[in-house]
Structure formats: structure tokens, C-alpha cells
Amino acid sequence: MELSLNTATVRKQWNLAQMIDGCARHGIRGIAPWRDQVAALGLQRTKALIKEQGLTVTGLCRGGFFTVKDWKDDNLRAVEEAHELGAQCLVLVVGGLPQGSKDLIAARQTIKESIFQILPVARKAGVPLAIEPLHPMQAAERACINTLEQALDICDELGDGIGVACDVYHVWWDPKLQQQIRRAGKKRLLAYHICDWLSPTRDLVSDRGMMGDGVIDLPLIRSWVEATGYAGFQEVEIFSELDWWQRDPDEVLTTCKERLAVS
Amino acid sequence: MELSLNTATVRKQWNLAQMIDGCARHGIRGIAPWRDQVAALGLQRTKALIKEQGLTVTGLCRGGFFTVKDWKDDNLRAVEEAHELGAQCLVLVVGGLPQGSKDLIAARQTIKESIFQILPVARKAGVPLAIEPLHPMQAAERACINTLEQALDICDELGDGIGVACDVYHVWWDPKLQQQIRRAGKKRLLAYHICDWLSPTRDLVSDRGMMGDGVIDLPLIRSWVEATGYAGFQEVEIFSELDWWQRDPDEVLTTCKERLAVS
């Protein structure tokens, strides 16, 4: 599997133009940019630079947050941007509990209904929507879709044009992981994100590890992904306030490439 | 449901004798002590003080950690202590990955086989074993049984004398929570632990909230527990380095009692 750079990995060091250039210099042929970075560089300029370097856009990060006001306009714009960039999917981080609410069941229902509303637009634009189940420790604040099983149940209800982004950081612990990756299959498995789980983990959001530095059996999970026929990239996405965001970004990219050997 | 004090809640302020006394003074009629505290006070002395105050021992914390050396002797001792104290169950925190291992599947197998080995002893002693699924963020270090479904699958394999401890902190996010509480039923549901999930959470281990201070819909989960016919206690277990462990322990117990109204 080829390497893709999720641009969160070097977001403290580089702007998007530098990231695109960095990918090209390091022979990394995939990129998954974040929308704030695209907005800063400009959509057409982003498109032109990515095209110039011949990079595959393995995903656009992100749509979602369906439990806040104005979710719809923002998600329709995200679909449009993903279409413009030729992204292989639009990643959905679905949002957590609305401010002041403890009603997880209602939040999950709202999320499903919201996806249902934007799905026809995404289908028409040829942009697959990828629900990213987030680690249960993110349920309150970021996403109350927390397992692949739950995400795939929603996909089954909603039909074509939707699948999942499988990020090892969020799902590595799941006793049903192999079963649900198999269930997703090539059709529903739209993206595969890698990094590592550090033990101990010092922060609930920004303490992800570089592949090989933690406890996730990456080759095993990759073998389950490959068994589906998945023909996409391995996208490295590392939030690391205390370590990798402090380093020279060229060193980060070099390390990502080296560590593919243990991924 | 009556209140029980899991002694972790005031473990920085009081020794076990003070905790037993505190429960009596505050009219809290259940207690779930930790084994290190029992060892410090002495098993027979603990037994005598608890009997003197007429407290119900809603659980002994804890057996488990089956993935470390010498697990067996320690767990057999734990069963014996739970028997001596007349505990309603021995809580099992099953252990995480062995040092240096990434093999979650093997660790889970080891855990199941180890429980299978001590179960006959526990049955004979009349001590129900309560597997406590821990939050997925604890999978590496403390317990790689992480959902009620996974725990109940093991119970189904192992037969009588084993069930689950349902701690809202670990399971509140689970989309299958209601379904799995129902599946557990009165037979398998051996303990119900409460506290709250703070948003944001500042630490992966010791930042639990007092009931009402977080985002868990406690009355809803309680209603699911009660629907099984569960006739036990609500056991308050709060690890809180930054807040409740810093407070006057009498204030902590008073607050626990007050907050039953929102639990």
C-alpha cells in the first residue's frame, strides 16, 4: 500500500503549499488536506499545486459536526470542495453531544438524518462520504459514532455512496475489528488511516504515536484491510503536540516513510 | 437503589477504618473496599468493623490482571478475601497487554483461560466473579475486555458463577449499551457503578466526575439496569486526582448522597 500524508501530521510546521511540496520531494504520492488549510491557500491554487505534483487526494478532512448549528451549508461546501479536488472521499467526523445535552441517542439520530440529507448531493458530485468512527473517549466532544459496527449499520440503512474511514487509532481496541473490516469490504472501506497508540497516552486528543512507537499491531490490521481487496493508500495521521509537531517536518516525513516497514 | 461507597472515591483522604466509619455516619449502607486497604487494616479487623456497622459489601476490588506473572496465587487469595468479607462479587479488572506485546487477541485468550481456571474455586467459595469491561482507552494498560458484549460473550462460554460489573464511566458511550444490559439480565449483572464523564476530560485515568457534573444520562442507564430486575446498590466510584481527592471526605460523601437525586 502506498503512503499518503494526512496534513494534520505536520500542521504546526508547514502551510499547505509546503506540505504539497514536501510530499513531492519525499516521493509521497498521496495527500489528505484539511479544509482550513485549503481555504488559506485557496481552493483553485490547492487544486493546481496538487495536480502539478501528480498527488492523489486520498480524502478531504473534514465534513460532519452535524450536531451544531449551520451544519448543512458547511457540509454542502465540503462536498463541493472534495469534488473540486477530486478527493477519493470526504471524511465525516460526525460531531458529539450538542452543548448542554446528555442525549446520546438523539444526537446519533440527528447525525444519521443529517447524513441522509447531504448524501444525494454527495452522490451527484461523485464524492463518497466516509464516516470515521472516533475513539469512544471522543464521544462527548467530537463524534458519537464510535465503532465500525455502528458506522456500518448506518451505511446499510443509507445505501450507496457512503462508507467508512478506518483509523487504527480509533478502532484498534475493538474486539469486533476484524469482523467489521470484513463486513465493510472493498465497497464500504473508503480510507485507511495509520499512526500508533502510545502507552501511556498523555492526552485524549493530541498524543498519537508514530507507527512502531506504540502497541497497535499494524501489520495485522493491514492484512485484514488488504483481505477486503482495498486498493487505496495508507494515510498517516498523527496529532502530536508533545513530539512530532515539535520536530523538523522533513524528519517527520522521512520517519513516516521508514516506518511503513512496520505498518 | 441504595448507595454504596467504592472506597477509591476517598482513598487519598481516609484509611479503610475511617471509610467504614464515614459510611456509618452518613447513612451509606454499602461499601466496596480495595484489597490494599483491606490488607492495611487486616482482613479480620475489616470484617469485624464492617459487620459492626452492618454494611453490605457490594464488591471487593479487585482480582484480575491475568496477563502478569503470579496472577493465579493473587486471584485465589482475592477469592478467599471476598468470601471472608461476604462480598457480593469479586470485581475483575482483567489486565492489558503483557509488557512488550501487541497481541491483543492472545491477551484476550489468556484472560479467558485464566478466568476459567479460577472459576471453580470462586463457585465453591460462593463468590460471583464480575468482569468489569474497562473503557477502550484502558485497553493497553488495564483491561483488554472493553465492552459489555465482549464480557458477556465470555460469561456465556464459561457458564455459572460469573457476570459483569457495569460501570457507567466505561460503557456510557456504547451504542449497544441498552441491548447488552438487557442481555446481562439479573443473573449476570452483579454490580452497577456510577460517576460521570467530564467534558473535557483532562486525564485518561483519574479525572472522573461526580454524578451530575458530566454528560452521562445516569437516570436513563439506571432505568435500563432496573428493568433487568437488578436489586443491588448503586456504587459510587470516582477517581479524581484534580478535584474530589482534594476535598474534605465528609463533603465528598454528602455530595454523593445528594447527587443520587440525579443518578
Image (spheres, coloured by chain):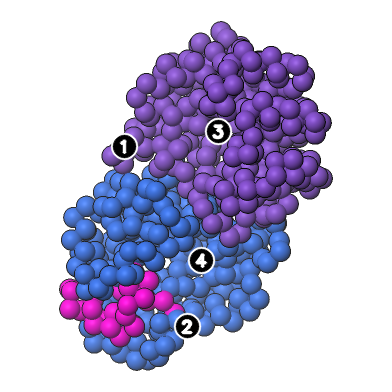
Chain colours: A blue, B purple
Where's residue B248, x and y in %? 70, 44
Q: Mark 4 points at which residue?
A: A93
Q: Mark 3 points at which residue?
A: B132
The image quarter in which residue B60 lies: top right
Q: Mark 1 points at which residue?
A: B99
Q: Which residue is at 32% across, 80% downward?
A: A14
Q: Which residue is at 74% across, 32% downward?
A: B22
Disc nearest the viewer among 1 and 4: 1
Secondary structure of residue under mark 2: helix
The residues tagged by marks 4 and 3 sit, at their Cα atoms, a distance apart of 29 Å
Where's residue B208, x and y in %? 60, 48
* First along the sequence among labels 3 and 1: 1
Q: Give, as a three-letter code, the residue at label 1.
A: Gln
Q: Which residue is at 55% across, 23% downward?
A: B40
Range of the magenta residues?
A: A6-35
Relative to residue B36, is residue B111 drawn left or right?
A: left
